[in-house]
Image (cartoon, helix red, strand yellow):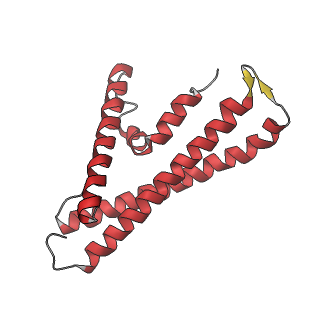
């Protein structure tokens, strides 16, 4: 099969922030180190997500630094990352619209029906990208506005 495996592309969509960070190390590391850094990044991402969920339940705030300017900067970067994931989701949705007519007519690729290899992968990846977009934008816009309003507070 030409190109990456559909399951690998879904894995990258589920771990989209790590996939975006891969831009910085992908070309400079050898394959075993690249894979080790990817797995470490995925573990750290989900550890941060778990800690953030726990902090959200206790204090209704994101797990970030307490330094105000650093918090505003990180919030802005995460909001921009969420909007970028929204654009990536739109790109995946465009692939769904491109592949859907062929799949419903029974188009068959080299290894079977294109439904499993392209259309379903694009559907899952688009929903993952839109999910990351919604979560990052909603949570961190709220945190950004809250931090910006409390200008004299050192800790929120």
Point out the image quarter for the C terminus: bottom left
- Residue 48 percent coordinates (x, y): 28, 47
- Vertical placement of residue 57 versus 17, above or below: below
Q: Residue at x 39, y 21 (%)?
A: 31
- Vertical placement of residue 49 versus 103, above or below: below
Q: Residue at x 28, y 65 (%)?
A: 60
Point out the image quarter for the N terminus: top right
How many marks do you count on the picture? 0
Q: Residue at x 28, y 67 (%)?
A: 72
Q: Seen in the image, is 43 located left or right of residue 19? A: left
Q: Residue at x 40, y 45 (%)?
A: 17
Q: Quadrant of residue 82?
A: bottom left
Q: Residue furthest right?
A: 105
**Viewer-proximal residue, 49 or 118?**
49
Q: Seen in the image, is 129 located left or right of residue 15? A: right
Q: Residue furthest left?
A: 154
- Residue 137 percent coordinates (x, y): 43, 62
Q: Quadrant of residue 153?
A: bottom left
- Residue 112 percent coordinates (x, y): 74, 22
- Vertical placement of residue 88 versus 110, above or below: below
- Residue 126 percent coordinates (x, y): 58, 47
Q: Residue furthest front?
A: 57
């Amino acid at each position: 099969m030409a190109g990456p495996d559909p399951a690998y592309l879904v894995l990258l969509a589920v771990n989209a922030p790590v996939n975006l960070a891969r831009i910085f190390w992908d070309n400079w590391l050898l394959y075993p180190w690249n894979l080790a850094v990817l797995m470490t990044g995925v573990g750290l991402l989900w550890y941060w997500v778990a800690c953030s969920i726990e902090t959200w339940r206790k204090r209704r705030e994101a797990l970030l630094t307490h330094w105000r300017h650093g918090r505003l900067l990180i919030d802005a970067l995460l909001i921009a990352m969420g909007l970028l994931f929204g654009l990536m989701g739109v790109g995946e949705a465009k692939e769904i619209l491109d592949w859907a007519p062929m799949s419903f007519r029974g188009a068959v690729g080299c290894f079977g029906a294109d439904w499993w290899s392209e259309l379903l992968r694009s559907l899952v990846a688009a929903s993952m990208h839109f999910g990351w977009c919604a979560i990052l934008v909603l949570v961190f816009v709220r945190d950004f506005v809250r931090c910006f309003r409390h200008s004299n507070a050192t800790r929120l």
